[in-house]
Amino acid sequence: MLTRWVPPSLVDEVVRAAGRKERRVRLLPARVTVYFILAMALFTDCGYRGVWAALTAGLPGPPVPDPSTAALRQARRRLGVQPLALLFDRLRGPLGTTDTMGVFWRGLRLVAWDGTCLEVADSPANVAHFTRHGVRTTRPAGYPQVRLTALVECGTRAVIDAVFGPLRHKELPQAHDLLPALEAGMLLLADRGYDGFEAIRGAAATGADLLWRVTAGRLLPVITPLPDGTHLTLICDRRSGDRLAQWHHRGRITEQPSNLTAITMRVISYQITVTAADGTTRVSTVRLVTTLLDPNKHPATELAALYHQRWEIETAYYGLKVTLRGPDRVLRSHTVDGVEQELYAMLAVFQITRMAITHAATTAGIDPDRLSFTIALRTARHTVINADAVGWTRLTGALTHVRNLAAPKRRCRTSPRCVKRTLSPYAYNKTKGSVGRKTKVTSHVTLLTSARP
């Protein structure tokens, strides 16, 4: 499975580009070490010797070397971070084509970005560099954390690009580093955490279109009402925003302020009514801003329903942090370089698995959302253990088998935003409703009409 999508020629290329090609042949050459680190991401529940046993169990011929844990650790240090970073750089990118279902909407490729955190080993080096999460009102976290921000293709959940660093690095600066991965023909979805003029201006300057949710307190005055009930507004920097706010609060009795540093965007407001099985309802209001200004070419009702696709990045993070890494696990590396090397390997293996899923879905003519990431990962592990060179063909068959396909239309469910994993397992320390449960619901979206200027 690994050599199907990461052939030895590619591994040799990145090793040579990173300047890590060995001068003499070792028992653990650089190429073998790269595959070993990728196998570490596949077998996260095994120690070094266990990973090596899984990697070499099915190899035919004479017995392979049996290196010690110390030898494998030294091989990782000799290799360094750069070969794995270059390997991920070769693998990353959108995978969907025009023949892949669910990737495009009206000719635009749906992408989303968001941030998350991963726990790393509690070593002095990791604590000093990555730091722990903690605020004055709560005790600090048990493990240091690394912050990861990724740009994901919604239709295939493939990683287009990703950046990570210490916890003190915030999501907005990390998202700025992802701007080169955006291009014309993409529709970028983002939540309220990226509601800022600089972020919007930077993303729009790449040529990509935006569909972002904004906070309830942001001023979005009606500059030009549109026939479908939406309206055009101005997103300004802080100084221009103050002038626009004064103009708005004066009841618009004067002309619109001139010389504003602003971007014209379209505002779509709608209400979501969620009805549970017991008849209880909950109503919430969502406001979106978009660079798609033509209401005829891009209907507001479709854009309101389309924003739900932003949650595909949350599903991708679940696959990376829970299915691949393992629930409640921390990264094994005790050094900063080791953590970075391990993260690049995890991202590479995640992308390889998404490649296999997308290839199988496109060949079968079905939506990649219907194929199981868990089954793909389990089959990939079997192909590594058995050293099965044609295992990827059986992987395609396993993914597209009727018993493994998800339903064409998922149930509409809601999950409360609350603590999923409490700090204490004891009941007397748990608060009421601290653990959320998914509930089957019926949702209804109603567009809100903008007021006249």
Image (cartoon, helix red, strand yellow):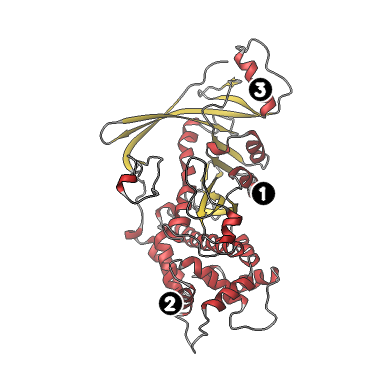
Q: Hey, what amino acid is under mark 1?
A: Pro
Q: Residues within 10 Å of mark 2 (few under 14, many from 20)?
A: some
Structural distance between the alpha carbons of marks 2 and 1: 40 Å
The residue labelled by disc 3 is 242
Does label 3 or label 2 sit earlier along the sequence? 3
| Image mark for residue 180 | 1
> On the rendered structure, is 445 left or right of 347?
left
- Quadrant location of the C terminus in the rendered image: top right
Kindly identify which numbered label has been placed on residue 386: 2
Compute the Cα span from label 3 to label 2: 65 Å
Q: Position of residue 434 (x, y in %)?
A: 36, 42
Q: Position of residue 42 (x, y in %)?
A: 47, 67
**Can residue 96 be seen in the rendering of this structure?**
no
Q: Amino acid at mark 2?
A: Asn
Residue 58 position, x and y percent, is 44, 80
Q: Amino acid at mark 3?
A: Asp
**Which mark is in front, 3 or 1?**
3
Q: Is residue 253 above or below residue 204?
A: above
